[in-house]
Image (tube, rainbow, N blue to C red):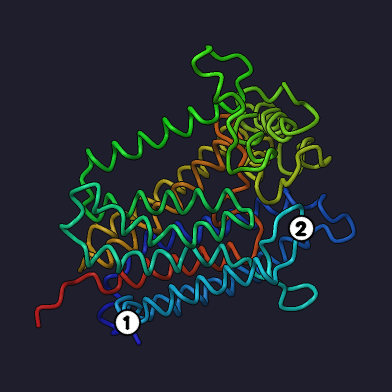
Amino acid sequence: MVDRRALRNLDFLFILFTLLLLAASLIILSTASISVIKSSPLHYVETQTVWILTGIIIAMVVGAIDYQKWQHFRWWIYGFNLVLLLAVILFGDTAKGATRWIYLTSSIGIQPSEFAKIFIILTFADFLAKREGRLNNVTDFIPPFLFILLPMLLIFKQPDLGTTLVFVAIFIGMMFVAGANPWKFGGLILGGVVIMGGALWLHFSTSLPKWLQWAQGLPLPLQEYQLKRLTIFMNPAADKTGDGFHILQSLWAIGSGELWGKGYRMGTQGQLNFLPEHHTDFIFSVVGEEFGFIGTITLLFLFLIFLLRAISIAMKARDMYGMLIVSGVVSMFTFHILINVGMTSGIMPVTGIPLPLISAGGSAMWSNMASIGLLLSVNLRHQRRMF
């Protein structure tokens, strides 16, 4: 239960902007999904309404629980997370070449990788809180990396490259907040980016100097279609009917919206189904086409205030554990927003990451609302105890 006096701590501006984003989701889906199932044009609006309402209940329940209680069950949560991810690989249903879902009935399923993000934030926050002040050397970074590596590998195995990258973002964000030496840790990150960039160059390069020809066509632990998605955004016109098709359609949709947009349900790329996955991964493109630059800026403004209020909650947290939980959630949301907007705008790879709180999807909505519940739990209890 929550002490009534604690309710005065609630960040009502954060709650307001969360509700505004949820309302925006229904408005956008009411036009983005109308042509997906022609026999039931409001199907995704109706299901999203259910996910939102149940998600609000989840947020309230999670918020009512003192976040510090999760520390007592950290290893149980971590173990359950691994079992759930392993179950996906062993018993999950395969669709479009990936095994990501476990169906509870013939029509109801869950995507465990969505909830895995919440589980890893809760457990990794405790892991790092116990190492506060002891993340100064490169060797100190190894235990945290190993802690997050196993669930990452299980998600990568599905394969789910997008969620794997979300784990990387959560890891980096939480490590910095936990006090990892910025120069040494930042240097490792920069080194990793350089190595990955070099590996991609060697893999795709057809002409190399003699001293590097031994590495030409360097094999990578990614399937060819994943590699294509990671690089095609640099020149989508090179494969107009294949991997570049999504990006080109998205660019045409956003560009054609100009300043004010074509109008509600007046878009062509989305309404005529030229734009694939326009109710999930590419829903931002629909915003650009039908509501124009003004609509996209308004949506991004809502996200900006939402994230700034979340950061404010982190800064007021009564302990490092609470601060790390919020930083993990903020890192997750920020990465989702940047990558989704970036990929629909043609400046980042297409990784299949939905726009949080906006895209259609039950598991994603429940996961997002559970994470918001964690923020509210930290927010309610931000005053430090005096005795």
Q: Nearer the viewer, residue 73 or 361?
A: 73
Q: Which residue is mark 2?
A: 95
**If you read the primary sequence from the N terminus, does the residue marked by circle 2 or circle 1 appear first?**
1
Query: In x, y percent, where is residue 190?
Result: 35, 34
Q: Secondary structure at mark 1?
A: helix
Query: Which residue is rendered at x = 41% and y = 46% of the image?
Result: 304
**Please, what secondary structure does the residue beneath circle 2 have?**
strand
Q: Quadrant of residue 122?
A: bottom left
Which residue shows up at 27% across the image and 70% down it? 9
Q: Within 10 Å of the Cα at label 2, are there few (<14), some (14-19), or many (20+) other Cα atoms?
A: few
Left or right, 122 with reference to 197: left
Q: Is residue 336 left or right of residue 5?
A: right
Mark 1: give few (<14), some (14-19) or many (20+) Cα within 10 Å.
few
| 70, above or below 353, in the image | below
Q: Position of residue 24 (x, y in %)?
A: 58, 53
Q: For this view, does 58 lie left or right of residue 249?
A: left
Alpha carbon distance from label 2 to label 1: 37 Å
The disc label shown at residue 210, or none: none
**Which quadrant would residue 340 be assigned to in this image?**
top right
User: Which image quadrant: the C terminus?
Assistant: bottom left
> In front: 221, or 39?
221
Quadrant assignment, res 94 = bottom right
Nearer to us in this view, 88 or 273? 88
Given residues 214 and 47, the one toward you in this image is 214
Q: Position of residue 243 (x, y in %)?
A: 73, 34
Residue 337 point in image, percent of width and height: 50, 46
- Residue sitting at the far right: 39
Quadrant position of the N terminus in the picture? bottom left
For mark 1, what is the residue? Answer: 72
In the rendered view, tell whether residue 27 sits above or below residue 81: above
Asked whether, in this view, residue 272 is left or right of residue 308, the answer is right
Say which amino acid is labelled 1. His
